[in-house]
Structure formats: structure tokens, C-alpha cells
Amino acid sequence: MVNTGMGRKNMEAARKKGVSEEQLKAIFKAHDINGDGRLNKEELTKAFRKLGAFVPGWRAERAIYYTDIDIDGVISEGEIDQLVVYALECGYKLDD
């Protein structure tokens, strides 16, 4: 589990508000603008902007820090599940 300081309780609350892991994953994948199967900082910034981040560029940097397992500076296909967990733990949800 990604340690964002938000904890399991907030992740469960986000799920109760109707956001699903599949929906978040779809949003992140839709922001893979160049289609290379990886999310760079610019693509993540746009995704977090869509999710309503107050400072999306900073949130994208933090997401890479917490979820980029192989430390290559991007979120690859194998790391997207960790990215989704991170987003849920931070309390992101889809706008109604």
C-alpha cells in the first residue's frame, strides 16, 4: 500500500462516494496522450487537473514520487494500480 498519510479509512470513504478503481484507471489511461503506455508528469498533471487537484503539477510530482516503483520518472502500465491507490488515498473522486 502506498503511504500517503491518508490511510485506509479515507480510501474507503472515497469508494463510498461512488468512485471506483476502474474509473480512476480509465481516467489516467485516457491521459496517456502520446499512447506509449506510460504517464509522464505533463500527462499526470492534466489527469489530476481533471480530478480537481488544487495544484495539479505538484500532485503529479508527488504521485510519481510515491508510485514510480522502478524510478524511471514515469508511471508505467505495471505501476498504474499503485497510482490509483495513491489517488484514492488522497481523496480524489470524480465530479458528479
Image: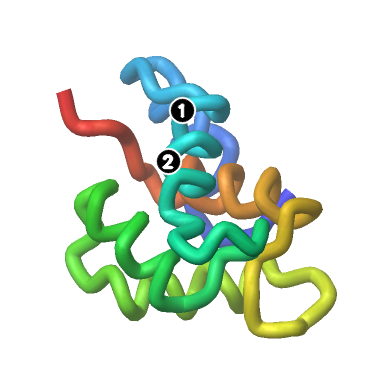
User: Which dot marks residue 27?
Assistant: 2
Q: Is residue 66 above or below residue 37?
A: below
- Residue 21 falls in which quadrant of the image? top right
Total tally of numbered discs in the picture: 2
From the top left corner, tell me how far across and down residue 87 is, in percent.
Answer: 47, 49
Q: Is residue 81 above or below residue 15?
A: below
* Amino acid at dot 2: Ile
Which residue: 18% across, 65% down?
A: 54
Which residue: 77% across, 82% down?
A: 71
Other residues around mark 1 within 10 Å, as few (<14) / some (14–19) / many (≥20): some
The answer to whether the residue labelled 2 contacts the one labelled 1, judged by CB atoms less than 8 Å apart, is yes
Q: Quadrant of the C terminus?
A: top left
Q: Helix, strand, or loop for circle 2?
A: helix
- Left-right relation of 72 to 74: right
From the top left corner, tell me how far across and down residue 84 is, in percent.
Answer: 57, 44
Other residues around mark 2 within 10 Å, as few (<14) / some (14–19) / many (≥20): some
Q: Is residue 4 above or below residue 92?
A: below
Which residue: 35% across, 79% down?
A: 58
Name the foreground residue: 35 vs 1. 35
- Residue 76 falls in which quadrant of the image? bottom right
From the top left corner, tell me how far across and down residue 10 is, in percent.
Answer: 45, 37
What residue occupies the far bottom of the structure in this picture? 72
- Left-right relation of 69 to 34: right
Residue that mark 1 sits on: 23
From the top left corner, tell me how far across and down residue 68 is, in percent.
Answer: 70, 71
Q: Helix, strand, or loop for circle 1?
A: helix
